[in-house]
């Protein structure tokens, strides 16, 4: 069973540009969450999508957005990039809400903003 | 708001010793907890989980203890190996907000040979 796949793994952008990151969840998982991880910080929650609907959102500015497609694949977009957006962006998927459903992470997309 | 915190940001242990990583959580509505390991350049990997109706769970070389009275979670690693060097996160799942997960800031474990 394939894990969570994130693309691209590494990318470099300049301030003011925008970026789109992609995440393919584990087959059958309908929930996809996005996190930002910076050096010395924990995992900062961005948002969660379930069946194409955003059902949770963290405290990030509107420059950060996301969406989910009917096949559960998800994308997140960051517009007007700032230096502080340099981070590892992690995607995680899980099954339904019941029971002990583990949040499974991808390897992340490392974004560097110059 | 909810907070999941780690007492020690860095822990250094000798190879072969046992390691204990601690985590405090604040939400009584949390029903499920997970420990993750994150190696450099990789995403967090599941280590072990525990439901709130349990106080101990054992895996291979790892044990998680849950004390709901003081809202404390710990991860014990037996016979720590160099490959255990990583950052360890605890996560709690709350029973609202669609069972949202909250993460601690992480503890870095250094295993000295």
Image (spheres, coloured by chain):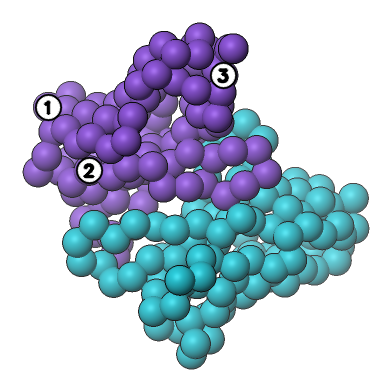
Q: Are marks 2 and 1 on the same chain?
A: yes
Residue A100 in the image: state x and y as whole percent: 24, 57
Report the quarter where the N terminus of chain A lies: bottom left
Closer to the camera in the image, A61 or A94 = A94
Q: CA distance from mark 1 to mark 3?
A: 30 Å
Left or right for A51, reference B65? right
Residue situated furthest left in the rendering: B53
Q: CA distance from mark 2 to mark 3?
A: 25 Å
Left or right for A3, reference A99? right
> Which shade of the palette goes to chain A?
cyan
> Which shade of the palette goes to chain B?
purple
Disc 1 crowd rating (10 Å Cα; few below 14, some 14-19, many 20+) is few
Residue drawn 53% across the image and 66% down it: A4
Question: Looking at the picture, does residue B7 appear above or below residue A112?
Answer: above
Residue that numbered label 1 is attached to: B69
Residue that numbered label 3 is attached to: B110
Proximity of marks 2 and 3: CB atoms separated by less than 8 Å: no
Please state the chain letter of the residue tagged with numbered disc 2 in the rendered image: B
Q: Is residue B105 visible?
A: yes
* Numbered disc 3: secondary structure: strand
Residue B74 in the image: state x and y as whole percent: 30, 26
Residue B71 in the image: state x and y as whole percent: 21, 29
Q: Are marks 1 and 3 on the same chain?
A: yes
Q: Earlier in the sequence, mark 2 or mark 3?
A: 2
Disc 2 crowd rating (10 Å Cα; few below 14, some 14-19, many 20+) is many
Please state the chain letter of the residue tagged with numbered disc 1 in the rendered image: B
Residue drawn 44% across the image and 58% down it: A104
Q: Earlier in the sequence, mark 2 or mark 1?
A: 2
Please state the chain letter of the residue tagged with numbered disc 3 in the rendered image: B
Residue situated furthest bottom in the rendering: A70
Q: Which mark is residue B50?
A: 2
């Amino acid at each position: 069973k394939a894990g969570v796949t994130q693309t691209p793994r590494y990318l470099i952008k300049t301030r003011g540009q925008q970026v789109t990151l992609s995440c393919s969840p584990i087959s059958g998982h309908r929930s996809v969450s996005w996190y930002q991880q910076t050096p010395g910080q924990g995992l900062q929650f961005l948002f969660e999508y379930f069946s194409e609907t955003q059902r949770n959102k963290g405290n990030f500015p509107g420059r950060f957005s996301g969406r989910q497609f009917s096949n559960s694949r998800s994308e997140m977009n960051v517009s007007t990039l700032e230096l502080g957006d340099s981070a590892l962006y992690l995607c995680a998927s899980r099954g339904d809400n019941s029971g002990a459903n583990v949040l499974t992470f991808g390897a992340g997309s490392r974004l560097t903003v110059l | 708001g909810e907070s999941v915190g780690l007492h020690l940001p860095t822990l250094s242990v000798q190879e072969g010793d046992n390691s204990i990583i601690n985590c405090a959580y604040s939400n009584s509505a949390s029903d499920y907890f997970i420990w993750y390991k994150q190696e450099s350049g990789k995403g967090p990997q599941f280590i072990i989980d525990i439901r709130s109706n349990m106080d101990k769970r054992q895996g291979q070389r790892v044990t998680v203890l849950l004390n709901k009275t003081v809202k404390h979670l710990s991860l014990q690693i037996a016979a720590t190996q160099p490959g255990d060097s990583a950052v360890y996160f605890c996560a709690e799942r709350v029973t609202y907000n669609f069972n949202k997960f909250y993460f601690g800031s992480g503890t870095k474990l250094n295993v000295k040979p």
